Amino acid sequence: MKKTLLPLCLALSLATPALSVQAAPSQAEIDQAVKVLKQAANQGLVTRYSLSELAQIVKAEGYSSVTTKGDNKVTFKSDGHLFSLYLYDDGDLQIYFGAQGVKVTADDINTWNKEHRLSRAYLDNDGDIALEADLFANGGLNEKMVSALLSIFVNTSVPAFIDFAKEHDKS
């Protein structure tokens, strides 16, 4: 039971549209999440991907300019934006997006974090905006989960974050 807790959170996020503030999942959403988990379990789980395997998954999803940096980072582009996918020693993954030229306040960032799920925003040391999301490996990973992380972050979270930043831009 312990091993399915984190993948259940991911499955709930896959089964639930990524909008702004959302209520607790309904029974139908929980049932859908369990179904996604069962399908994922049938596809074989791993505890960790290598950096080259992650780069292959990113390429297979159709992203451009896919490169590996050092021993823990895959960079790629989508719609002209640069993304970084980090691989941690324990197999966890973190996806990152940052942008310059937009000035928002810490209160604005707090509003984003309060009203949006599946990612967290912050201001970096230079005051630039950043958005991240994680995929924990301790319950197991498969390509479908990694692909879902990429898709949700790149196609849903980041466009919404860019719109939010533009609406709150103080520059």
Image (cartoon, helix red, strand yellow):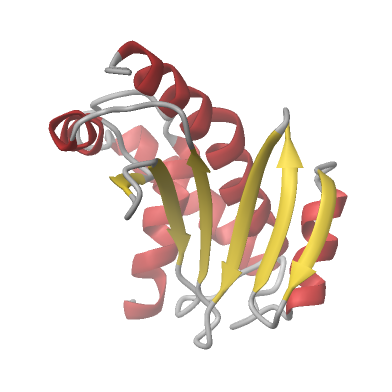
- Looking at the image, the residue that sits furthest to the left is 107
State the residue at coordinates (73%, 81%): 50
The x, y position of residue 23, in whole percent, is 20, 30
**Front-most of residues 67 and 62:** 67
Residue under the image location 42 percent in, 30 percent down = 18
Residue 103 against residue 59 in the figure, above or below: above
Residue 117 locus on image (x, y percent): 31, 39
User: Which residue is farthest bottom?
Assistant: 89
Please name the residue shown 27% across and 17% down the image: 170
Judging depth in this view, the residue of 56 and 68 nearest the camera is 68
Q: Is residue 51 left or right of residue 87?
A: right
Q: Give 153 or 71, whichever is nearer the viewer.
A: 71
Judge from the rendering whether residue 59 lies leftward or rightward of residue 85; answer left or right. Answer: right
Quarter where residue 2 is shown: bottom left
* Along the viewing direction, whichever of 127 and 16 lies nearer the viewer: 127
Quadrant that contains the N terminus: bottom left
**Could you say which quadrant of the image residue 129 lies in?**
top left
- Give residue 110's position: percent from left, percent from top: 16, 37
Tag count in the figure? Answer: 0
Q: Is residue 105 left or right of residue 72?
A: left
Q: Is residue 69 above or below residue 27?
A: below
Please state, as top left, top right, bottom left or bottom right, where the C terminus lies in the image.
top left
Q: Is residue 83 above or below residue 105?
A: below
Who's the residue at 48% across and 35% down the image?
A: 100
Residue 36 as seen in the image, left or right of residue 167 = right
